């Protein structure tokens, strides 16, 4: 069973910029595995390390096409625009319409330290952008207008108070 609990907004770790993973050791491999387990348990399609309290550039993604684990991911090329409803495990219960690039080329390294590159579109492109946002402390509420953000946070506050 995964030992991680997903950290919720407004925890300050969610706002920090994550450091690069310098060395892929046993710890990194274990963290990645437990992050994937946590993502599946909580029925997410992606998870970034800061969401489980680890301020490192590490993400896991599975939009139904298999698990992708990426270390030090970067968006290298983007194309097009697309708007879609998004949620986040750190902000349970709320969704907002987020505009993102429709296509994104993402580079990083896998758990073997091998460079990998993805030319993503659709859900995968969106999910990569969402998770990579987490690595610089950015959340879905930062990607919408102030009015929509205030509304979403009001709703979120109400939900967390009644829990
Ligand atoms: Ni998220």
Image: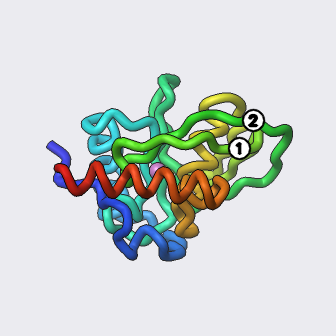
Which residue is nearer to you in this view: 129 or 73? Answer: 129
Residue 8 in the image, given as x and y percentages of width and height: 32, 59
Is there any visible trace of residue 51 in the rendered image? Answer: yes
In the image: residue 58, left or right of residue 122: left
Which residue: 35% across, 42% down? Answer: 93
Instruction: Confirm if mark 2 falls within 8 A of ligand 1.
Output: no
| Label ID, residue 60 | none
Circle 1 residue? 99
Nearer the N terminus, badge 1 or badge 2? 2
Which residue: 64% across, 34% down? Answer: 84
Q: Is residue 117 above or below residue 82?
A: below
Q: Are marks 1 and 2 in contact (CB under 8 Å)?
A: yes
Which residue is nearer to you in this view: 63 or 149? Answer: 149
Residue 83 falls in image quadrant: top right
Give the secondary structure at mark 1.
strand
Which residue: 57% across, 49% down? Answer: 130
Circle 2 residue? 82
Residue 25 in the image, given as x and y percentages of width and height: 37, 65
In the image: residue 98, left or right of residue 57: right
Give the secondary structure at mark 2.
strand
**Mark 1 Cα shell of 10 Å, populated few (<14), some (14-19), many (≥20):** some
How far is the residue under mark 1 from the one under mark 2? 6 Å
Which residue: 14% across, 42% down? Answer: 1
Residue 41 in the image, given as x and y percentages of width and height: 25, 36
Which residue is nearer to you in this view: 63 or 142? Answer: 142
Is there any visible trace of residue 111 in the rendered image? Answer: no
Instruction: Confirm if mark 1 falls within 8 A of ligand 1.
Output: no
Q: How is the image coloured?
A: rainbow
Residue 57 in the image, given as x and y percentages of width and height: 51, 64
**Mark 2 Cα shell of 10 Å, populated few (<14), some (14-19), many (≥20):** some
């Amino acid at each position: 069973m995964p030992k991680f609990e997903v950290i919720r907004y407004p925890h300050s770790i969610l706002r920090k910029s994550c450091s690069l993973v310098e060395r892929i050791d046993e710890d990194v491999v274990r963290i990645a595995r437990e992050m994937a387990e946590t993502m599946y348990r909580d029925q997410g399609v992606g998870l970034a390390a800061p969401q489980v309290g680890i301020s490192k550039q590490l993400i896991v993604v599975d939009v139904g096409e298999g698990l992708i684990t990426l270390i030090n991911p970067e968006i290298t090329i983007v194309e097009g625009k697309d708007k879609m409803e998004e949620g986040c495990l750190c902000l349970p219960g709320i969704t907002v319409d987020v505009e993102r690039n429709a296509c994104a080329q993402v580079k990083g390294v896998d758990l073997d330290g091998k460079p990998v590159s993805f030319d993503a579109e659709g859900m995968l492109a969106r999910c990569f952008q969402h998770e990579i946002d987490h690595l610089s402390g950015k959340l879905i509420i930062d990607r919408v207008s102030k009015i929509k953000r205030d509304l979403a946070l009001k709703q979120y506050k109400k939900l967390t108070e009644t829990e």
